[in-house]
Amino acid sequence: MHLLLLLLSVMTFTVQSKNAVEVSGTCPPLLEVSYSCTYQKGDVRAGDTATLSLTGLNGIALETVAIYMKSNKSSGAGKITITADGSVIGQEEGTYAEWFGSYNNTDFQPIGWSGTQKANTLQVQITGTTNSLHIEKYEIQYSEGARYTVTLMNGSEVYQELKEKNGGGGVVLPALSSTGEWQFMGWSETEFWEVTSIPQFHAPESTFMPSHDCRLWAVYQKGSSLKQLYVKDLTEWGIYIYFHSVTHKAMSGTPVDGRMESAPLDLNDEKQYYRVQYINPDTAYIFDMRSETPIGYSGTKLAAVLSPWKVYHEGEETLFYTEINKKNYVLWPDLTDDYGNEWYTGLRLAEPGSSPIRLIAPMEQHISYTCHPEAQGIEATPAGADGKEQVLMNIGDYELIIKNGKKQLRLR
């Protein structure tokens, strides 16, 4: 596992303390670095662990990962594990003398991995088995990932093509003007027509990191903005949706096996409607609106039992929480499992305070979202004598007739 040095971009992480490294060289723009050693600085005794973790690599092609180490005068052993995107790509276990031919307490020598591996994350972990190994720095050589092109679609038309200036550098998404009653919101990775559940999208002026050549569609909203619907004044009772204002995930359904569903916010989905009954400004009961099933807790699990919830409310922020064994647990609508695959609502150990959790009053409100504001008003008409369906599209004062693939525009 000794290294062949190549002429590539290089990042260097020199150990400064048990919790810090100095970063130098050419790094990906969104790189984030963390380092920790269970003993001191880069010293790894038997049972100690030093870990360097990198995120934000965005698909660079790793070529070499080198750890510069020395040993004690006559001892030093350990295990090196190098992991990219959760998969082990390199591993070495033995004594320093087995790696380099002899022990050396004077000179730092490189050991690690070489190959070609695309990566978004990287972890280098050294666990000591015999006193002691001493780490000076980590050196990573890589080549940039491919430069991808993002095609921006505004309705059915290509608005712009953006190409990364550097592989892994991403592109900055523009803001578009609103069109009529449709307000521009951002860019979606999937195309859709009119929906009422809030879609996932990338905000304008944000940096989008493509993993391949792809398309994004402009997303538009019609109706009141969500912010206008946030509950700012608590009343004795009301019908509300409880949701996370950043991920737009809402509490849904009733408790099953200690948790509840988490679903995309939809003002028309009655599974997300809850009756909140305030005992006083600081305490409330919560019920499913459809079945009047109480939303409560048993220990740190959600349960269909009548339970008092403590209330934190400040401005447009509202969250419910409870104290269990002298610890506060917040009712949180966008938790994920250990693998980040499944969303659910549950209790999260956290202190009540400023948060993205909101109440929204959904009754008699209507918000729609679309990637095709130019096509709203489409309605199917009965088939003609020839059996071919006609489609009518209203565009201002005109009607667009599409029949058997042919188009006709006429004044209404």
Image: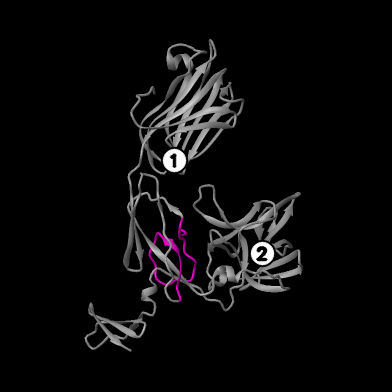
Residue 120 colored magenta?
no
Upstream in the sequence, badge 1 or badge 2? 1
**Amino acid beneath label 2:** Ile
Identify the residue at image location x=71%, y=67%.
285
- Name, please, the residue furthest toward the right: 280
For this view, does 307 lie left or right of residue 56?
A: right
Residue 201 colored magenta?
yes
Q: Counting other residues with Cα less than 10 Å from the Cα at mark 1, is it few (<14), some (14-19), or many (20 or more)?
A: some
Quote the CA–CA distance across marks 1 and 2: 38 Å
Q: Position of residue 374 (x, y in %)?
A: 37, 74
Q: Position of residue 390 (x, y in %)?
A: 28, 83
Picture layout, residue 48 above or below residue 317: above
**Amino acid beneath label 1:** Asp
For this view, does 150 lie left or right of residue 408?
A: right
Residue 61, by quadrant, is top left
Identify the residue at image location x=23%, y=89%.
385
Q: Which residue is mark 1?
A: 85
For this view, does 147 lie left or right of residue 65?
A: left
Mark number for residue 295? 2
Q: Counting other residues with Cα less than 10 Å from the Cα at mark 2, is it few (<14), some (14-19), or many (20 or more)?
A: many
Q: Which residues are magenta?
A: 181-205
Residue 400, by quadrant, is bottom left
Q: Nearer the viewer, residue 384 or 234?
A: 234
Tell me which secondary structure the magenta stretch mostly adopts: loop
Q: Is residue 210 visible?
A: yes
